[in-house]
Amino acid sequence: MNHRNSGYRLTDGGLVDRSQMLDFSFNGVAMKGYAGDTLASALLANGVNIVARSFKYRRPRGFFGVGAEDPNSAVAVQDGYSYEPALRAGQVWLAQGMKVRSVGGWPRVEFDLGAVTQLFSGMLGAGFYYKTFKWPFWALFEPFIRKATGYGAPAKATNDRTVQQRHAVCDVLIIGAGPAGLAAATALRGSGLKVVVADDQKEPGGSCRWESARFDGVPAAEWSRHIATQVAADADCTLLAGTTVTGAYENEMFTLVQTIMDEQGVRGERIWKLMARYVVLASGMVDRPLMFEGNDRPGVMLSSAVRRFIGEFGVSPARRLAVYTNNDSAYLTALQAKAAGVDVVAIVDTRPANSAIYLNEARAVGITCYCESQIESTRGYRRLEAIALRQAATPNIVWIFCDGVAVSGGWTPAIQLAAHRGVKPEYDVERSMFLCKDLPAGWFAVGGANGALDLQVALDQAHAAAHAIAEATVTTLNGQRFIASARGFGAIRAFWLPTHGASHRMWVDLQNDVKVSDISLAVQENYVSVEHLKRYTTLGMGTDQGRTSNVNGLALLAALSGCAISAVGTTSFRPPYTATSMRSIAGARSGDLYRPRRYLPAHAVHIALGAVVLDFGWERPDWYRSNGDDREAAVRAEMASVRNGVGVFDASSLGKIEVTGPDAAAFLARFYVSNIATLKPGRVRYSVMLREDGVIFDDGVVTCVAENHYLASPTSGNAEVVAAWFERWRQTEWPQSRVAIAQVTSNWASIAIAGPKARELLMRLEPGFDASGKAFAHMEFREGPVAGIPARVARISFTGELQFEISVPARYAGALMQSLLAETALTPLPIGMEAWLRLRLEKGYIHLGSDTNGRTTPLDLGMGDIVSKRKDDFIGKRSLELSFAVDVRREQLVGLIATRGVLETGGRILAKAHVRPPCPTEGYVTSACESPSLQRSIGLALLEQGHQRTGEKVRVLCGKNLIECLVCEPTFYDPKNERLHA
């Protein structure tokens, strides 16, 4: 086939669809590519040299890799669905109309004023920020440093991509659909095992798509398409293309991110949580660079990346290409480039001639080869122009003019996922690579992930893994094997640090601007732990996770500290394997799907009554337009209805947890401060429950429905939490308890009627029990029909008025609300949350979370007598005896009456002897309102030593106003409970 180089796009070759032209733009310049291109290949085909700028010195960066390993190519991408601020160009498949911009460089990536920092590079070595920015203080420099960092700005536009989540289980997960992964999947076909094959490329095949190999005489690309079709057609096999396995966790749980593409771009993503019995790690390996002075110039690229650009995309990264290597794989790059019509000007091999197995073949096609030689330095700025070659046999330097260098210093297996499971990589001296040799049970590493440098070896390893899985599962394999015909990668002779060249111009980590001199400085300053080296120099801390830099950095650390590479070890690998957006992780959990709205069973009735609904954890009425022209007028009318007549309040969101069994009483008594074990059937008791540290966790009432049958009613926001709390203690601490716990909050609707006419309203609904004052006392419970509906009725109050809480099956909530409000002779009004909370404030009842904080104990609320009466144990009891709980300086709950001004929630109470701020404070207002009943501004507060300060005057800073207040008992309304007992 005759390939001719037309610009950077070869006139033929590759797997792109040349019949389908795609338009896109880069930094505002219109460009064209083909279907099947990535952004990287399309940009190279359009002659783009500089795609980014480096982190510290703002040096120009060109394409270095071809996928996840590329440390340079972060770009901002706008496709037909959304904008992404920082994606690797090699991982983005080209779509029609894409708009691509560089994320670094000001005013533009080709001319970055930030490059002036190169003039001060001698002062910006490893750890310079630790040494420099500590004076006069870090905050002075932080805004400028933050502005200089980062990889793109977040989007302001709406993201139209769909995000889905899937959960699945399989017998075998094969990670990678290259030749080894496809061979393993083929061997398992027909075994009856559920197999999932995940590969991060748009099309399966891996290196088959660009390497010149044959399988049973069939070209690699054709073979991989055929095998992938067979695998996908198998009912027991699932082939997930465009899917990256991002993390491996305990119990063989994996997270996967699947990209769904169409002609407009990325239409959506699926996040998979997949559990597998067996794992075949066929994730391949990435090329490793060599170091030399000026090795960061655009045009220097990994050898395998050059080979893939030519073989898969029909793009030549250079017109005049040199190859620099210490192994045989780079010779394959030179031979492929030469066959494609690229001018290969030289192969520079650090090894002696007898080590290069393809040396004669390269010379036979006219490629000049230099053995036992090194690249000493390079020339050029925005693009490589020439390399300086030093041969071992002569001290002279030879300049070779070229605009590209393909480098290969060996191979690094992609073993991150095994390392996620805690496996420690071990250094293999013969192959100069880290391998995971002691894999978790059920794991098999094959192909490049297992260090295979020969294709047939990779296929044999895949077949052996399939046989081992078949033996473990007692299944039968189809026995299909493949014979590969391909050039192997041959031997590697490790070559780390060149003998010539300036170390302060040799780059180890291209993204973070880590140089050989930085590692040398770190060793001089005794940062010889690999983890310390990473943090001190930022080696491998970029978005590429050190794929092309870590091993070189570790080798340099070993050489400079005088120890073996195996003794140095590696840094920790942590998920995700590649960058994953927070939006993808969140999935569809946004807006209403972030936390599904919870509606009261009678929601439609509330809307018909003109309710203004707000999110209180549940969608609940705040006030009713039918009760007033504005919020304040409606709230006052609703409060007056409760104080003077009767109000109807929907309390269905309150928690309802049934606890039953012979040990139910003793079980609940361990949670509540009050002794629930003494509670008799038909009685109700209010109490609080504590955490182990004695701090209040929740409050509510407990009802003894019958012997061994209790109903706990936690707060609305804590209903699920308390149920889980009960279950946790039952399972982990008291598993012998004969107790059953049922969360029934959504099964029952609770409608409260409160006010002097509450009993009369209840009687009009013909209850099936005696509701008279003598027969139905405060804190008692009855069961029977109400308005013909099966009901549970408790006489409890949150308002200080006579109150009945009627609980009915949830489907009857609307009917009960309508029946109660239909008794127009009593003029009942629906009551919203704001009025309800102000009513409880007048009575001095606490609202958990408002009148308590993360330090409040029952002693602070005046419940010391209840605590002291308990002789038996309950959760948190012993903590109440600790010094922190009895400290006289604690904040305690008090009431405040404003003698002048209006109190506001959150107001700070000034310390004694201080008349105006700034000054210390000794408490704050937890709840406040204008009380219609008292015609005063009142509030509850947590005040230091509050229980001893009744009658004292304090000053409260509310906004900019100082309010004078009188400290009082927290019960403002009906302190003798005459109305409550009715």
Image: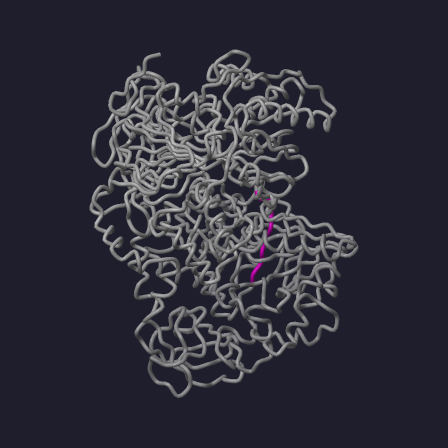
Residue at the bottom extreme, as displayed: 913
Q: Position of residue 300 (x, y in %)?
A: 34, 36
4 vs 49, nearest the viewer? 4
Reply above or below: 247 against 620: above
220 vs 564, nearest the viewer? 564
Residue 802 appears in the figure: yes
- The magenta-colored residue range is 803-810
Q: Position of residue 218 (x, y in %)?
A: 50, 12
Residue 608 appears in the figure: no
Residue at the front extreme, as displayed: 394
Q: Quadrant of residue 679?
A: bottom right
Q: Position of residue 727 (x, y in %)?
A: 68, 52
**Residue found 31% across the figure and 40% down from its top:** 397
Q: Position of residue 2 (x, y in %)?
A: 32, 13
Reply above or below: 313 against 166: above
Taking the magenta stretch, the answer to whether it contains residue 879 is no
**Residue found 52% across the figure and 37% down from its top:** 414
Q: Main secondary structure of the magenta part?
A: strand
Q: Quadrant of residue 96?
A: top left
The quarter in which the N terminus is drawn is: top left
The quarter in which the C terminus is drawn is: bottom right
